[in-house]
Image (cartoon, grey):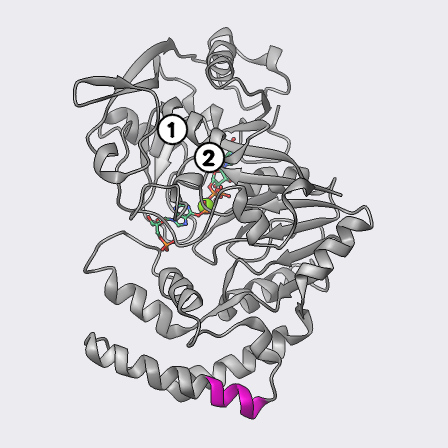
Amino acid sequence: MTVTLILGLQWGDEGKGKIVDLLAGDYDYIVRFNGGDNAGHTVKKGDEEFKLHLVPSGVFYPEKMKVIANGTVVNLDTLVGEMEEAEKRGYHMKNLILSSCAHIILPWHRMMDGGLDKVGKIGTTKKGIGPAYSDKASRTFALRAGDLLLPEDELKKKMALIASHKKKIFKALELPEFDEAAITAKTIENAKKVRSHIADTQALLNNALDGGKSMLFEGAHGSLLDIDHGTFPYVTSSNTISGGGCTGAGIPPQSIRRVIGIAKAYTTRVGEGPFPTELDDAVGEKLREKGHEFGTTTGRPRRCGWLDLVLLKYTCMINGVTDIAFTKLDVLDGLEELKVCTAYELDGKRITDFPPDSHRLSRVKPVYESLPGWEEDISGAKKREDLPEAAKKYIEFVEKQLGIPLKIISVGPKREETI
Ligand code: GDP
Ligand code: IMO
Ligand code: MG
């Protein structure tokens, strides 16, 4: 029984979609275990592209089992829309399974997210992620995918109970009214479309593992957006680290044999929160333009900065990363000098342990080592030897500092642009 887990080592958008698509051919199951449609994963095959928010990044492989497991929160409009789009483009969704224990995001969650984020600004995607996970933790007023299998009158009764509670909260918070009848009708319509895909995925996944099937787990977001280990409160509401794969899918830890951490060759972040190596200058702008660093889900410009090894050592540690996929190296083409952060200064002291707390992190000053850049376009490189000396040195430096092999190096968005 083998699970390979893929996850982001920074603040998201590391190129997880590309790497999942690249490796999906070797696995029987592709599994999403956390988050919702706040994720935006890009997959490309030739000139064809999907920007996926819920459907696992194995979309180009209709024959593979694709599972949205219990740890996720699901916006049914997004799910139905993505399934219909994939079907329309010739990729059938017969093998998509939604866990009966996944939680459903409803319009009142999105409205609340939009309303509350104006107050204590985190810069969320406004997809209702925090409010939906809050309802999961509070239990009484949550709706799960399994509830969509209830007889229609029972589902309506359940939704009416939740809606009456939400109305009281909306009134107290002075949020706009919502249309309960329309929300209920749409949920029932969506339920009819997804019902045949709902299953108890704990047994399904474990039986498949026992039967020798292989699985690729597709983490969403990035390790520093983890609700426990990230830069709280500027995080998302799920466990994005490797441990989240066990709780989010109900598989035993010993089944995870390989943890592939995806690290971008520089650093980006969307939304608020501390970012020690952020660049507010022409280099930051160049990275944003060349790397097309605009949010896949919200279109917001991503904040850009130098590679931060203090941060990466921390996320490799908490995830048990066995190998790294180093992405977007081509975006560094044409930079004369490359800076890499190897330590922080905090209150006059040099530290190398990442402080997992926004207050301290916002006060650190990065300590940089400088490496030479390269002029060449590296997007055609197929093996390490094809790279200019300076690019090889940059990779070797990162590998040595982290003590983990960079097994995959990505030099462009397409499958074939990979070493
Ligand atoms: P994810 O959320 O981690 O799946 O990443 P996103 O899809 O949100 O953002 C990554 C973006 O970079 C997408 O537009 C990808 O097509 C693109 N991309 C992935 N790998 C590379 C690469 O090696 N080089 C370049 N230039 N673009 C890449
Ligand atoms: P992928 O899977 C980048 C960020 C948001 C915000 C914070 C909380 O594509 O890498 P939320 O809506 O989750 O409550 O927002 O987390 N965020 C992401 N940033 N990539 C993502 O996903 C993200 N998912 C959430 O920008 O700062
Ligand atoms: Mg993304």
Q: Quadrant of residue 417?
A: top right
Give the magenta-colored segment's residue range: 152-158
Residue nearest the viewer, comparing 25 with 359: 359
On the question of residue 178 being in view, the answer is no
Tag 1: amino acid: Leu
In the image, residue 69 lies in the stretch drawn in magenta? no
From the image, tell me which residue sits under label 2. 9
Label 1: how many residues lie within 10 Å, few (<14), some (14-19) or many (20+)? many
User: Which residue does the image show at 19% across and 76% down from the upper left?
Assistant: 174
Q: Is residue 113 left or right of residue 47?
A: left
x, y percent for residue 29 = 71, 50
Is label 2 in a helix, a strand or a loop? Answer: loop
x, y percent for residue 120 = 21, 56
Q: Is residue 307 left or right of residue 199?
A: left
In this view, 230 is above or below 180: above
x, y percent for residue 238 = 44, 53
Mark seen at residue 311: 1
Q: Is residue 370 left or right of residue 219?
A: left
Task: Choose the circle earlier in sequence order: 2 or 1.
Answer: 2
The quarter in which the N terminus is drawn is top right
On the question of residue 10 being in view, the answer is yes
The quarter in which the C terminus is drawn is top right
Label 2: how many residues lie within 10 Å, few (<14), some (14-19) or many (20+)? many
User: Which residue does the image show at 19% across and 30% down from the upper left?
Assistant: 363
In this view, 136 is above or below 192: above
User: Dominant secondary structure of the magenta stretch?
Assistant: helix
In this view, 104 is above or below 249: below
